[in-house]
Image: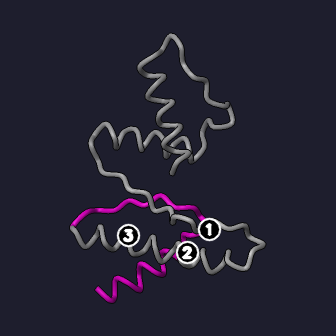
Amino acid sequence: MQDVIKITTILEYNEKNPDTPITLPAELENTPILQDALLYKIAKENKIKIISLEGKNLKHLKDTPLYNENRASHEQYMTSVINEMRGKGYNVIASVGSSHLVNLEKSLENSKSMI
């Protein structure tokens, strides 16, 4: 999420300062992260609440023993945050990495049957 916020900040700066824009790397063009930044910018402009689903202190390299354990913890955390927001009556749009998608869908489906 931090990278999306940084790119959004650059986009906002460029909009306000067209004479001295900050050039984004060409590799960002047509990427999901740039699309996320554009969506985040639009959400901010329309006062739509955005929350991060990133698990704090859960990042580990793939070759460490904690990787799979923390991956599951991260997906449980995402499920709990999404369910908490749904429980408050909010519609939730979650942008998550493709590696989490299948497990997160299963987790949300299982938790829906518990609600």
Q: What residue sits right under mark 3 in the picture?
A: 81
The residue stretch that appears in magenta: 89-115
| Residue visible at 62% across and 65% down in the picture | 59
What is the distance, in whole Å, between disc 3 and disc 2 at their CAs? 17 Å
Q: Residue furthest top?
A: 19
Task: Give x and y (percent) for residue 1.
Answer: 51, 51
Callout 2 amino acid: Val
User: How far from the left and from the top, in percent, is residue 53?
Assistant: 45, 62
> Which disc number belongs to residue 73?
none
**Residue at (40%, 38%) from the top-left corner?**
41
Give the alpha-carbon distance from disc 1 to disc 2, as whole Å.
7 Å
Mark identifier at residue 102: 2
Q: Which is more foreground, mark 3 or mark 2?
A: 3
x and y percent of residue 49 in the render? 30, 51
Dot 1 amino acid type: Ser
Q: CA distance from mark 3 to mark 1?
A: 18 Å
